[in-house]
Amino acid sequence: MTFEKLGPLLKEDRTPAICEMCNNYIYKRVYYDENSSKKQKTVFVCKNCLSKTKLKKFQ
């Protein structure tokens, strides 16, 4: 999934879940999505793994 197609970030909360790859917390992010019926898209993401993926992409 790419985050470029999602609208602005509306809300972010830390969940009690732990990432199995890096042992950091999983975050619940709510983005604006005009194509969805509720105009929102919920994504669960580990910020640490997400930033590592972005770094690899630009190197």
Image (spheres, grey):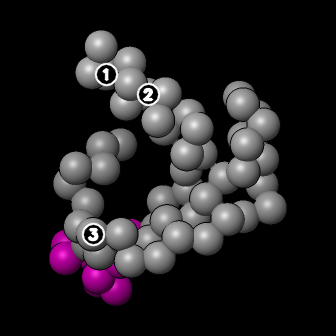
Q: Secondary structure beneath disc 1?
A: helix
Q: Secondary structure beneath disc 3?
A: loop
Residue, x 72% and y 31% (percent of image)?
22
| Precedes in sequence: disc 3 or disc 1 | 3
| Tag 3: amino acid | Pro
Q: Tag 3: Cα neighbours inside 10 Å, few (<14), some, or many (≥20)? A: few
Tag 1 residue: 57
Check the picture and name the quadrant holding the C terminus: top left
| Tag 1: amino acid | Lys
Residue, x 30% and y 50% (percent of image)?
3
| Precedes in sequence: disc 3 or disc 2 | 3
The total number of labels drawn is 3
Q: Tag 1: Cα neighbours inside 10 Å, few (<14), some, or many (≥20)? A: few
Disc assigned to residue 3: none
Left or right of residue 57, residue 14 in this image: right
Left or right of residue 53, residue 28 in this image: right
Disc assigned to residue 53: 2
Residue, x 53% and y 70% (percent of image)?
12
User: Is residue 57 highlighted in magenta?
Assistant: no
Tag 3 residue: 8
Mark 2 vs 1: CB contact within 8 A: yes
Residue, x 20% and y 73% (percent of image)?
35
Residue segment shown in magenta: 34-41
Chief secondary structure of the magenta portion: loop
